[in-house]
Amino acid sequence: MYTIPLLDPGKYEIAVKKEGFRSVTRSEVELHVNQTVRVDVSLEVGALAESVQVTGAGAGLQVETSDLGHVGRK
């Protein structure tokens, strides 16, 4: 597990490469203020020249109201 603290909000691309495995790239990883994002990656045995690219959009930010949200714990 890797942690990268203090990143600015925005869209990021994550690339994972290791000799002897296929590389994996995750595009459009969106990070909002005070958000923790978890990106799980599994490497498959293969040539480094091969790559897998996954794209997708994250949840949108609520901008219509100024309400504050709360996440409760059980």
Image (cartoon, rainbow, N blue to C red):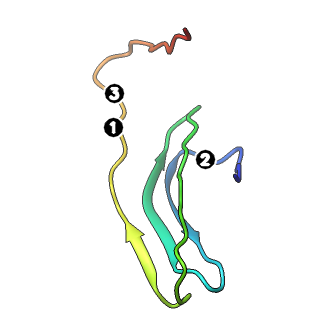
User: CB of mark 2 within 8 Å of CB of mark 3?
Assistant: no
Residue at x-position 52% and y-position 74%: 44
- Callout 1 amino acid: Gly
Q: Badge 1, how many Cα within 10 Å: few under 14, some, many 20+?
A: few
Q: Quadrant of residue 6?
A: top right
Which numbered tag is attached to residue 8? 2
From the viewer's side, name the closer residue of 8 and 73.
73
Q: Which residue is mark 1?
A: 60
Whichever of callouts 2 and 1 sits on the residue coming sooner in the sequence is 2
Q: Percent from the top left, x then y, of residue 57?
A: 33, 50
* Quarter that holds the C terminus: top right
Q: Position of residue 50 (x, y in %)?
A: 46, 86
Three-letter code, disc 3: Gln
The reply to whether dot 2 and dot 1 touch (C-beta < 8 Å) is no
Label 3 environment density (alpha carbons within 10 Å; few <14, some 14–19, many ≥20): few
What kind of element bears circle 3? loop
**Marks 2 and 1, how far apart in space?**
17 Å
51 w.r.t. 28: above or below: below
Q: Secondary structure at mark 1?
A: loop
Q: Is residue 67 above or below residue 52?
A: above
Question: How many angstroms separate mark 1 from mark 3 (CA)?
Answer: 6 Å
Q: Specify whether 59 is left or right of 33.
A: left
Residue name at image x 50 percent, y 50 percent: 10
Position in image of residue 62 (x %, y %): 33, 27
Q: Which residue is mark 3?
A: 62
How many neighbours does mark 2 have within 10 angstroms: few (below 14), some (14-19), or many (20 or more)? few
* Disc 2 secondary structure class: loop
Tell whether label 3 touches label 1 (CB within 8 Å): yes
Query: Which amino acid type corresponds to the residue marked 2 in the rendered image?
Result: Asp
